[in-house]
Image: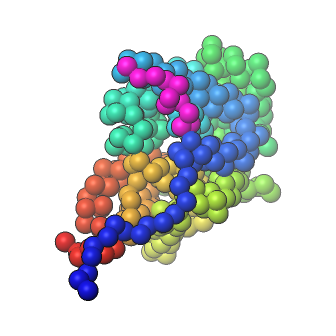
Amino acid sequence: MAFMRQSSPHVRERVSTSKVMLWTILATIPGMLLQTAFFGIGSLIQVLLCVVFCLSFEVLSLKLRGKQPQNYLKDNSAILTGVLIGLALPALAPWWLAFIGCLFAIMIVKQLYGGIGNNLFNPAMAAYVLLLISFPVPMTQWPAASYLSASTPGLLSSLDAIFFNNLEVIKQAQLGFDGVSMATALDTLKTDLTLGLTSSESLAKSLFSNDYGSPWMWLNLAYLAGGIALIQLKVIRWHIPTAIIASLFFCSALGYIFLPDLSGSPIFHLSSGATMIAAFFIATDPVSAATSPKARLIYGALIGLMIYIIRTFGGYPDAVAFAVLLANICVPLIDYYVRPQTYGHPRD
């Protein structure tokens, strides 16, 4: 009997886009709550503000394109973009940063290319890079963690700082108990290395050497837990997160072995900055990420490699957004050369 070609028997349960986005949003809640506990109610205000802005710009963009907003808002993608941008902003960042970032993410990166499914780049990370390059000072003014801070702003103080740019509130929130201005772990290490300190001397500072550990370590653990839940629920696959973590661990291990005084340890890199939220919530974006399992592994490994290179040799302490966007550019090339053979069809 002659062989008859048939369509590939790829059978799997279909999950709607709205459910995927909703589960992803819910998985960020542990990290979101912990971030609010560490850096104040301003972190939650930023998330809510960005969600409102993203939904507003989504409605405006759809109306300008002659679409019915109610048919598109149900996918929850604008809400997820707002959540990710809000989590990336410092707790007391001025409101106009959220406004500009959300406008760029929704109207330029997403809707200008035809809406969800057509954007080339991750909207939240494109917005973050725009804000970081254009407004580096307010984008790097993170408050000191609550257990290290001399003054943690309350609701009214946070609103005053965010909407009326109360510099006194921002300045006080950045001070530790010893009156010294605090910085993120990655920024502290990078600055100290440029001043001639070794990594061990830098990591001995009060930001790291305390009974609680770094707040960024706990945040990364929270997002790791949320990411594992997404894998268990089959909302995302394991390939990209595993490749990012393995690649970053391998690269930082080599750096720590051969240049121990000039590089953070693998654990430091994995537990600092936005490593875990990038691995599980950002790089796994189904639109801008690679498609096949092998391509996802290459895509994730590339992100891990670039995170380490930019953190170590680049001008920005945390390289997650840059690494994801650069990998987004490479996705068509990766997908082209790593195409799986279709079942029942000969390889090209």
Is 66 on the left or on the right of 102, as rendered?
Answer: left
Question: Toward the viewer: 55 or 2?
Answer: 2
Q: Residue at x 29, y 67 (%)?
A: 339
Q: Quadrant of the C terminus?
A: bottom left
Seen at 38% across and 64% down, the residue is 292
* Residue at 77% from the left image edge and 23% from the top image edge: 155
Pinpoint residue 193: horizontal percent, then vertical percent.
Answer: 49, 54
Residue placed furthest toward the top: 164
Q: Which residues are magenta?
A: 66-76
Asked if residue 274 is positioned above or below residue 244 in the image, the reply reads above
Provide residue 190's location: percent of width, then percent of height: 50, 51
Q: Nearer the viewer, residue 37 or 166?
A: 37
| Above or below 123: residue 6 | below
In this view, which residue lies farthest toward the left? Answer: 348
Is residue 202 something that shows in the picture?
no
The N terminus: image quadrant: bottom left
Question: Residue 71's x, y, as percent?
Answer: 50, 29
Taking depth in this image into account, of 147 and 22 the one nearest to the observer is 22
Q: Nearer the viewer, residue 82 or 341?
A: 341
Q: Is residue 306 above or below residue 329?
A: below
Residue 74 magenta-highlighted:
yes
Q: Is residue 213 visible?
A: yes
Residue 161 included in the magenta stretch of the image? no
